[in-house]
């Protein structure tokens, strides 16, 4: 990594793609801080990781149902394509901003590298409260976003996917509009699509199932009995809901769940029927009321933050009583909280490992689209389990080797792969 040619390449990359200090991903820099010295990163190598390769900001006029026009802003960050085309979700949320999208794109870069996928990292978003829009308005907004992004996305350049407040239907609109724009329907331009539009079997449960495979490997190494293992899940949407059902089927005791309005706690555990009915009707099962903040502090074996980022902070980390934190949301633990949990002996299984199931099956969908194949549920699940186990084994081995926490080990592995790929592409 210390070759002069690589120094020159890094310098050229940074100066060409991020000449202004405002383009620096400050949150990414903070996450890299403990890794830089460990890997003895050169200043130019670190700069390459701290600056996104491309930031696309767009404004979109959209006709509303009442005939008026609203202007929406959006962004797409393509962080680094050393390993291949960039990959990452699109979220619709009123708190979306460029800094958040940059950090999430960085995490996707790390996650794809760790999972051994031929992808770089990306993320996109529109600043909007989707609950305020009708379905037709959301569709027009999505199609306007596609046209604004143009051919900066594509099957061999940048492949979006669902994220917060987007789903298979939204991805279907995206693929359809992209096809109209380019003159040819190309299903591989996005993943997470409906099955009839080229989606993959198993994609809807992929993130949750991937997390379950990690839990099973961890519990097996510790000799825990699933029936005696209590689990609290913050977030009862697509990811949290599926992981609740999947763990319950395997005998785990789900004692608390929550949504954006609050949570419920049942120390004896919820029944499968209660969980199924609750998720189907988008409500919570009956139990003792707890806030989302209180749920994080319950005395459980496994805590699963599966909602939004920055839920465990330096303000509440000391009160987290769980033995293990399985990060199913993106960046649910701040850097300061991470250090506190590690010092207290709480094991954190990081997001870039725990929730990688979604992007792994997205990769499977992309492969199926390109090869015009359709895999069975069984094949998808088997291949997902293999990928998750490989990543878990690599991280745990690196953790033992370095005597570090799992997040540090995961970052070390991923960053090394990105930089090696960058070196190979320097010509």
Image: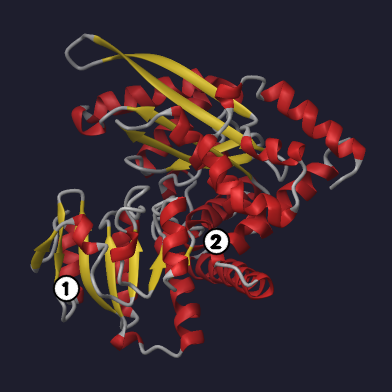
Crowding near the residue tagged with mark 1, few <14, some 14–19, many ≥20 C-alpha atoms within 10 Å: few
Report, in whole angstroms, how far the alpha carbon at label 2 lies from the one at label 1. Answer: 35 Å
> Image quadrant of residue 406?
bottom right
Marks counted in the figure total: 2
Residue 113's spot in the image, x, y percent? 65, 53
Question: In x, y percent, where is residue 17?
Answer: 68, 24
The residue at the point 33 percent across, 72 percent down is 322
Question: What's the mark number on residue 55?
Answer: none
The residue lying toward the viewer, choosing from 254 and 190, is 254
| Left or right: 64 as drawn, with respect to 114 | left
Give the answer, above or below, for where 388 lies relative to 9. Answer: below
Query: In the visual, does 142 lie left or right of 367?
Result: left
Q: Residue furthest right?
A: 4
Q: Is residue 5 visible?
A: yes
Quarter holding the C terminus is top right
Image point (44%, 44%), residue name: 193
User: Where in the figure is residue 201, as x and y percent of width and height?
Assistant: 46, 58
Q: Residue at x 63, y 72 (%)?
A: 403
Residue, disc 2:
407
- Judged from the image, the secondary structure of the residue bearing numbered disc 1 is helix
x and y, in percent, of residue 294 in the image: 19, 61
Q: 41 above or below 323?
A: above
* Sequence order check, earlier mark of 2 and 1: 1
Q: Is residue 2 left or right of residue 197?
A: right
Query: Which one is closest to the eye, mark 2 or mark 1?
Result: 2
Front one among 36 and 234: 36
Q: Is residue 187 visible?
A: no
Image quadrant in which you'd find residue 167: top left
Query: To which residue does mark 1 refer?
Result: 273
Q: Helix or strand or loop: what does disc 2 sit on?
A: helix
Is residue 367 toward the left or the right of residue 423 in the image? left
Q: Residues within 10 Å of mark 2 (few under 14, many from 20)?
A: some
């Amino acid at each position: 990594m210390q070759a002069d040619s690589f120094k020159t390449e890094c310098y050229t990359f940074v100066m060409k793609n991020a000449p202004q200090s405002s383009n620096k991903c400050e949150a990414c820099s903070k996450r890299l801080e403990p890794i830089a010295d460990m890997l003895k990163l050169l200043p130019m190598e670190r700069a390459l990781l701290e600056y996104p390769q491309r930031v696309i900001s767009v404004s979109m006029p959209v006709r509303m149902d009442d005939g008026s026009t609203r202007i929406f802003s959006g962004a797409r960050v393509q962080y680094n394509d050393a390993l291949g085309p960039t990959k990452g979700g699109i979220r619709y949320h009123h708190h979306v901003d460029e800094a958040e999208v940059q950090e999430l794109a960085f995490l996707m870069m790390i996650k794809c590298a760790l999972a051994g996928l031929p992808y770089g990292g990306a993320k996109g978003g529109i600043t909007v409260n989707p609950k305020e829009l009708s379905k037709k308005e959301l569709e027009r907004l999505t199609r306007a976003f596609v046209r604004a992004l143009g051919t900066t996305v594509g099957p061999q350049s940048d492949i979006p996917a669902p994220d917060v407040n987007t789903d298979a239907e939204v991805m279907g609109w995206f693929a359809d509009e992209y096809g109209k724009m380019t003159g040819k329907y190309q299903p591989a331009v996005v993943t997470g699509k409906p099955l009839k539009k080229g989606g993959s079997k198993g994609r809807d449960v992929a993130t949750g199932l991937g997390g379950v495979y990690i839990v099973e490997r961890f519990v097996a190494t510790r000799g825990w009995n699933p029936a005696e293992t209590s689990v609290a899940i913050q977030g009862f949407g697509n990811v949290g809901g599926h992981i609740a059902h999947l763990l319950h089927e395997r005998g785990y005791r789900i004692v608390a769940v929550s949504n954006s309005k609050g949570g419920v706690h049942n120390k004896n555990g919820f029944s499968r029927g209660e969980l199924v009915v609750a998720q189907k009707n988008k409500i919570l099962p009956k139990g003792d009321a707890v806030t989302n903040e209180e749920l994080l502090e319950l005395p459980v074996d496994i805590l699963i933050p599966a909602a939004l980022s920055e839920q465990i902070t330096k303000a509440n980390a000391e009160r987290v009583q769980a033995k293990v934190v399985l990060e199913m949301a993106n960046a649910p633990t701040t850097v300061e909280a991470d250090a506190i949990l590690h010092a207290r002996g709480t094991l954190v299984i990081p997001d870039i490992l725990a929730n990688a199931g979604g992007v792994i099956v997205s990769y499977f969908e992309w492969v199926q689209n390109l090869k015009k194949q359709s895999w069975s549920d069984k094949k998808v699940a088997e291949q997902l389990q293999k990928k998750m186990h490989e990543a878990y084994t690599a991280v745990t081995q690196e953790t033992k080797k370095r005597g570090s926490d799992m997040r540090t080990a995961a970052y070390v592995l991923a960053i090394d792969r990105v930089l090696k790929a960058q070196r190979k592409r320097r010509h």
